[in-house]
Amino acid sequence: MTKTAQKVLLSGIQPTGRPHIGNYFGAMRQFVELQKAHQCYFMIVDYHALNFVQDAKVMQENILNLALDYLAIGLDPKQAVIFKQSDVPQHAELAWIFDTITTMPYLERAHAYKDAEAKGKELSVGTFNYPMLMAADILLYDTDVVPVGADQKQHVEYTRDTAEKFNRIFGDAFKLPEPMIVKDVAVVPGIDGKKMSKSYNNTIPLFATDAEIEKAVMGIVTDSSGGVPKNVYEIHKLFRTEAELADLYKQNEGKYKNLKDALIGDIKKFIGPMRERREAFTKDIPAVLKILKTGGEKAKAVAEAKMEVVKERIGVKLY
């Protein structure tokens, strides 16, 4: 099967800080295998990140670091399009068009809005409206599948709703994408037992130093009521099979430090090769930037073609 005949897959990560093992097992790990069997677009979604990162120097550093992370985990620019969202202005353009057919009550059902409202937080228009930019991200490329965590299905549902509504009002222009959910790892727990998230400050960084790994694992909250520390085990089974862990946890029942030490060793062994690849790419930053620029040019060509169809459908294309 040629690349052109393969299904189109798109995913993106916000450059809001260091990725953690939750990002890796929840999404990034899949990317490496998926790029072999799909036409893949992997974005650095920097415009989404503007809702959280509003310092130019920090944003630049975050974007470059995420590009290095993508390459270090094994993404191959010869197999996939790796690009920066802001290099393709059609994302913001299409999001505005979607805004015009979207109601505020509909957006108020989004998880981000509900979470902020429950916490009494003031929400930016960008955060309130992020489902429409996300829909544009996905629909510009005639995406067939979007890898998401089990708790992120709503993102794809919003996109499908928006595509259906546009097609109904203006005529067919968009495919309806499907979510692709990893069966074994849906939600990765953090060191406190909640979902691993930068906003909870409960992560284990993907490219952590040995000292950082040790500090994070030793900080995992344990429940003293049973012999198996649930939070340690839930993270540990990302690195070993449950069959392998059965003996280890039986032999060390109630010995939480031993189990944490074993987890530390497994994480170091797993992260080590990726950390070495990342250090190698860091020595040639111009080459990394060229990969992003070339990817942006490829993505923009596809997005421009789709926007010509959209403009014709909505009636603004006169010449």
Image (tube, rainbow, N blue to C red):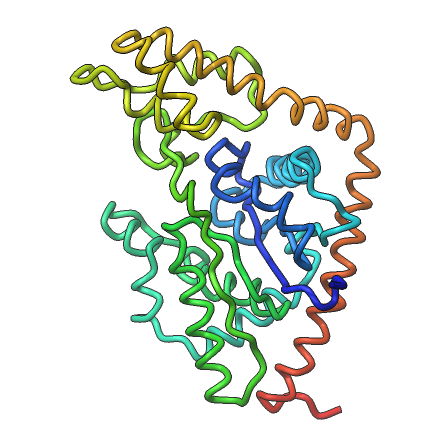
In terms of depth relative to the viewer, which is nearer, 28 or 293?
Answer: 28
Residue 171 appears in which quarter of the rendering? Answer: bottom right
State left or right for residue 32 relative to residue 166. Answer: right
Residue 289: image location, x then y, percent: 78, 42
Taking the spot 66% from the left edge, 57% from the top edge, the residue there is: 38
In terms of depth relative to the viewer, which is nearer, 239 or 60?
Answer: 239
Taking the spot 47% from the left edge, 66% from the top edge, the residue there is: 132
Image height check: is 311 above or below 289? Answer: below
State left or right for residue 282 relative to residue 186. Answer: right
Residue 21: image location, x then y, percent: 49, 31
- The quadrant in which the N terminus is found is bottom right
State left or right for residue 299 relative to residue 209. Answer: right
Residue 155: image location, x then y, percent: 43, 60
Residue 312 appears in which quarter of the rendering? Answer: bottom right
Taking the spot 57% from the left edge, 40% from the top edge, the residue there is: 29
Image height check: is 97 above or below 43? Answer: below
Image height check: is 32 above or below 180? Answer: above
Residue 318 appears in which quarter of the rendering? Answer: bottom right
In terms of depth relative to the viewer, which is nearer, 63 or 13?
Answer: 13
State left or right for residue 18 relative to residue 84. Answer: left
